[in-house]
Each structure stands twice: as structure tokens, then as C-alpha cells.
Amino acid sequence: MAKAIQLQSVITCPQCGFQKEETMPTDSCQYFYECEACNARLKPLPGDCCVYCSYATVKCPPIQAGNSCCGY
């Protein structure tokens, strides 16, 4: 049986440590994310497809499903 895809993930700003639970998009990658505490503009680390794969508690939905994400 397939594992359920989680859509909620807690993203942590590497600049200030602020954390926020967000709902991940299922139809696209989120390449940029702006921290609402310090206004840092986050982008994925090298080798990751989106900010959730780099800075959040749960990887993005395509990666969870075992697929490549947005062509990466």
C-alpha cells in the first residue's frame, strides 16, 4: 500500500531560526521562500529541488512519492 503524502511541513529559516508550518504545493516546486521574521529570501541548497527539501521537516510531495521533482 502506498504511503500517504504529507502536505504540512515546518520550514526553518537558516538565517534567524524562525519556524512556520506551511502547506506545500502539490502542482509545483517552491523555489523561493521569504522568512516572515527576518525577510531572508531562501532558495534550495545545491542538489535540492525546492526550499522544502532543504529547510523543512518533510520533503516535497513528488520526492515523498519517489519521483523526481520538477525535472531535477
Image (tube, helix red, strand yellow):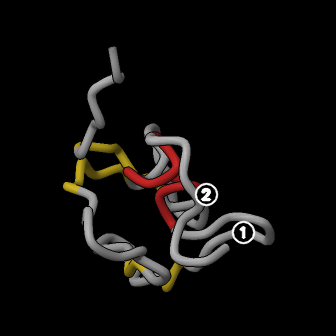
Q: Residue at x 40, y 55 (%)?
A: 18
Q: Residue at x 51, y 67 (%)?
A: 51
Q: Which residue is drawn at 33% across and 14% down?
A: 1
Crowding near the residue tagged with mark 1, few <14, some 14–19, many ≥20 C-alpha atoms within 10 Å: few
Quarter of the image with the C terminus is bottom right
Q: Is mark 2 on a helix, strand or loop?
A: helix
Q: Residue 54 carries which label?
A: 2
Identified by mark 2, the residue type is Ser
- Which one is nearer the viewer's eye here, 71 or 48? 71
Note whether 64 is above or below 34 in the view shown.
above
Q: Which mark is residue 45?
A: 1
Crowding near the residue tagged with mark 2, few <14, some 14–19, many ≥20 C-alpha atoms within 10 Å: many
- Which one is nearer the viewer's eye here, 4 or 17? 4
Question: How far is the residue under mark 2 from the one under mark 1?
Answer: 6 Å
Q: Which mark is residue 35?
A: none
Q: What element carries label 1?
A: loop
Q: Which residue is drawn at 42% across and 74% down?
A: 29
Identified by mark 1, the residue type is Leu
Q: Return the x and y of residue 69 as percentages of the image width and height.
A: 54, 66
